[in-house]
Image (cartoon, rainbow, N blue to C red):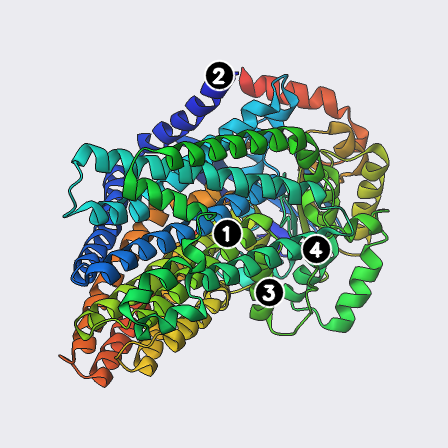
Amino acid sequence: MFNTLSVLIKLDLQATRRWFEKEAIWKFLIALAFLSVMIGVGLLIYYFSLFYFKYLSEFEVYGDLTIGYVLRATILIIAWIGILSSFIGTLTFLLSPNKVTDNLVTLPIDPLNIISWQIVKTFVLNLSLFLITIFPLALSYFSGRNISLADSIFRSVSVLLILSLLVESLGSAFAYIIANSIKKKEGPLYLFGAALVFLLGTILVYFIIFPGRLDILSEIEIENFAGVFNNLPLMRSCFIANSLTGILENGFGTHYLSIASVTSLLLIMSILIQRMLFITSWQQVRLDLNLPKLKIIPTKVLTLNLIKKDILSILRSPKELGYGIFLFLMLIIFLSLFARGIEVNRIPTRFTSSAVVFSWFWLIFYSGTYIIRLVFPLMAREGRTRWWLFSLPIKTARLVESKTLAGLLISLPLLLVGFIEWSLSPIGTPNLYLLASGSLVIIWLALSLTLIGMINPDYTLGDDPEKVSTGFAGLTALGIVVLAGTALSYLINLSAKGDISLSDSLGMLFIAGLATLAPLLLVALRSTEKHTVEV
Amino acid sequence: MNQLAILHVENVSKSFGKLHALRSVSFDVRPKEIYALIGPNGSGKTTLINNIVGLLKPDNGEITIAGIDINQKPITAKALLGYVPDNPANYPFLTGMEFLYLTARLKHLSQAEIDKEVGRLKDIFPIEDVLNTPMAGYSRGSLQKTAFLASLLGDPKLLVIDEPVVGLDPLSIKIFGEKLQQFSKSGGSVFLSTHTLTFAHKYADRVGIIHEGKLIHEVGDPKKVDLEKMYEKEVHTAYV
């Protein structure tokens, strides 16, 4: 079994190596930039939590308990996001036929190999997510405590590994059960059922972390504090987040062995379920899924028809829709919990501008990721259908116009996230200003990234938009998002501190947006004109 | 230039780096004519077609459709065209019927015209049930038929078809050929490339042989000659 698995893993490594062969220096630089972004995010979390934990440790009993609570809450949130990520990753894999897996299925190999191959890939992805979120948080927790560096790393890595395996086991098994249950007629029911489970789960996570009792904690006597605190839902020992925090707090012990045993058991059960259901799930892909159909309503407006086509290309593709829902939910979960966290902890004034900038940057970063994944490849996705699109009697300007507007429409749900974020957030700076600035930047990102995606689209990757987003052009676009996000966060920081007026700040955003969009539009028009005749 | 020509190709050359894909190719396709281009793999058939439909721009030469230069006035020229590529990959998330409606809309047809045309076209091949399913599950033949139906929308004056019968069953090939003949009788012209000599022999009014980017021979009435022998002879001579 391990021979086949190692061949499959080598296949992925080979593909990565091949990717670096062309334009190696640029790709290396982009990969380096991407790595720097990840390290930057990790450092941001590290320093933010370090300052916050130091501030909390000024209050003896209350401070330590609150730090423990923050750790548990973060692990629970990240675990929930991880389960969601594994579920959607596996479900989209099962619902989107691909030739590589087709070929593997026809070969005389145990499905266990294919499953393990997928598990390894999702495990690595989850691990990298946890490495930039939980790892810096854990390190900032250990800072100033009497724990050796080796022990700190051992405890943190243990938590990362257990958590990665745990979320992978739960998310993937659930995805297999759903994919296998999708039958022609009941298909939408199962999908909506799964979405409902995750929505209810998210609400449950919210109330576990922020129960009503949390608000009265500041009003009760200090001697009763620990008693009430330890009875909060998140502190109950049955929660895995509690056991994992136990590893961080106490290191190796019985709780370590018990959570490791539970994880191993869940992993074995998950693999057995996946092995049992893999072939039938894969065969299921070939059936015509009775997913909700959205009719193209014929309209006289040419552009509107092209926009509808592009929107349908997302709504009717399980993979694209899955990614969209995942990123959207992740953004909502993260920002709403963060905003509520600030409110519950009654963040001190000196942290207000940092909290504003932190949540503002995350909103832009996640929005950028969503747009790069779904909107940026809109032109490249025409790869195999250029023959049709470019042989139609339509002006190039129409094509550019339709793609840009489609990109904007697909990005509109992000404005809703901004609205939720700033409505819930109790932080000092006027929320209306944050809503306006956030919306302006999201609209700018949607328009500019759609246009950048049209400048030099890689049509050869049209069948796999994920590769367009993670390819050379996609990573360059991500670099632009990070640069723009950093520069704009600085501007927001100045506004939050009152160094520049809010109207001036909005004016600057507006003018900078227009000044960058105009040349991008011209270049995209020229480039598309060139592509329509130089295929 | 032949004023009567629907498709006029004059001294068209196209190179990709050091590869000369087309070398001064000239020919006309007249009204009501089916012109078949035959030639070995890599001889330049698809490159020529891509130049004709505006997907490539020739390095030299001129291509006009009903007197309109495809590179000077692409929108007007493309409105006169119907095109079916060699491998008509399509939007997997749309049904065939949705694709036909979308194409008709983008060819500026009114709602009444769309209903009438789609209603007429969907009966050409017995694939109405298939047309109502997403194209993700289509066989190559079904994709080919759907693309062919789409090319007929909007009353084109010229059909340009790359390898029309690859992937089609014998009955569909017959329907396809007859439909092309019917189209040409009603005033349209067809320019197609094919490897299937029997198809060219049976349905084409004229045949051109292309080899290494050059049009080496034209046959006035392929029904009167042994096309297979002539093809072998011409290509062999060109090789030598």
Label drawn at residue A188: 4
Residues under labels 2 and 3: Cα distance?
Answer: 47 Å
Give above or below for A101 relative to B93.
above
Q: Residues within 10 Å of mark 2 (few under 14, many from 20)?
A: few
Q: Which residue is found at the position 72% from the left and 48% from the top?
A: A289
Residue farthest front in this picture = A223
Asked if the residues shown at circle 2 and circle 3 are in contact, with their CB atoms under 8 angstroms apart, the answer is: no
Q: In the rendered picture of this protein, how many numbered marks are placed on residues?
A: 4
Q: CA distance from mark 2 to mark 1?
A: 31 Å
Report whether residue B55 is seen.
Answer: no
Identify residue for label 2.
Answer: A2
Quadrant of the rendered image containing residue B206: top right
| Residues beneath discs 3 and 4 located on the same chain | yes
Q: Which residue is mark 3?
A: A308
Q: How many other residues sit within 10 Å of disc 4, few (<14), some (14-19) or many (≥20)?
A: some
Whole-number angstrom distance, CA of label 2 to CA of label 4:
38 Å
Task: Give the class, few, some or many, for how many residues have Cα within 10 Å of label 1's Cα (few <14, many ≥20).
Answer: many
Q: Is residue A142 visible?
A: yes
Point out the tag, 2 or 3, that comes first from the N-terminus: 2
